């Protein structure tokens, strides 16, 4: 994020804290696609659930905007989204969140980049939710380790462990899949 984008975000957050609904709308438009992407990974591609959780996140953020103390607004949103995800997971007892939609066998052959992305998303879906969240925040969404740890409300060392274990598991799964694809 450039300095001017950061300043614009901080200005919009300051206005939103003072009750400016239009400024909050700017924040929503700025962050909704990234937040939805984070939630899609957590819910293993369940778009309807990710959309519901994103909507609940923004509603809660609007109600609690006065509690935002500055810094990374997106990280603050992800912390709310993570909390909403965990509440939903407890409510559904995790097993339903781990249901993954079937992929049709008659999908036309796609380009290599698309297949690699699919393999990566499939491998991410196999990870523990905390590892998925840590990897997504740090690599896909570009948060620092410190910001991601704060977002997930875990110690920095614990976040680094989840990132390292998740990366190792991804590397192993993708290596195994590559061996199968070549054979």
Image: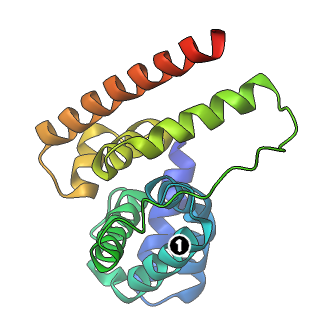
Q: Is residue 104 above or below residue 81?
A: above
| Residue that extends furthest to the right in the rendered view of this protein | 108
Q: Is residue 119 above or below residue 45?
A: above
- Where is residue 166? Give x, y as percent: 32, 33
- Residue at disc 1, secondary structure: helix
Q: Is residue 60 above or below residue 135?
A: below
Q: Quadrant of residue 152?
A: bottom left
Residue nearer the viewer, 65 or 134: 134
Q: Which residue is mark 1?
A: 49
- Where is residue 78? Give x, y as percent: 38, 61
Residue nearer the viewer, 19 or 78: 78
Q: Residue at x 33, y 52 (%)?
A: 129
Q: Residue at x 44, y 35 (%)?
A: 139
Q: Quadrant of residue 22?
A: bottom right
Left or right of 52? Residue 112 is right
Q: Residue at x 33, y 84 (%)?
A: 64
Q: Quadrant of residue 172?
A: top left
Left or right of 8? Residue 172 is left
Q: Residues within 10 Å of mark 1 (few under 14, many from 20)?
A: some
Left or right of 128? Residue 103 is right
- Where is residue 12? Give x, y as percent: 51, 71
Q: Quadrant of the C terminus?
A: top right
Q: Residue at x 65, y 27 (%)?
A: 116
Residue nearer the viewer, 175 or 38: 175
- Where is residue 144? Give x, y as percent: 33, 39
How many marks do you count on the picture? 1
């Amino acid at each position: 994020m450039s300095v001017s984008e950061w300043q614009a975000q901080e200005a919009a957050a300051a206005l939103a804290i003072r009750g400016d609904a239009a400024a909050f709308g700017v924040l929503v438009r700025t962050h909704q696609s990234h937040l939805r992407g984070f939630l899609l990974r957590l819910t293993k591609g369940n778009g309807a659930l990710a959309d519901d959780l994103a909507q609940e996140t923004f509603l809660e953020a609007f109600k609690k905007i006065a509690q935002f103390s500055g810094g990374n607004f997106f990280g603050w949103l992800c912390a709310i989204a993570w909390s909403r995800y965990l509440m939903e997971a407890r409510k559904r007892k995790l097993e339903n969140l781990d249901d993954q939609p079937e992929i049709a066998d008659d999908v036309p052959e796609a380009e290599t980049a698309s297949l690699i992305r699919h393999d990566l998303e499939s491998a991410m879906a196999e990870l523990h939710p905390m590892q998925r969240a840590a990897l997504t925040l740090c690599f896909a969404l570009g948060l620092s380790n410190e910001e991601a740890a704060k977002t997930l409300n875990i110690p920095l060392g614990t976040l680094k462990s989840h990132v390292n274990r998740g990366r190792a598991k991804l590397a192993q799964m993708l290596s195994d899949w590559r061996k199968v694809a070549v054979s």
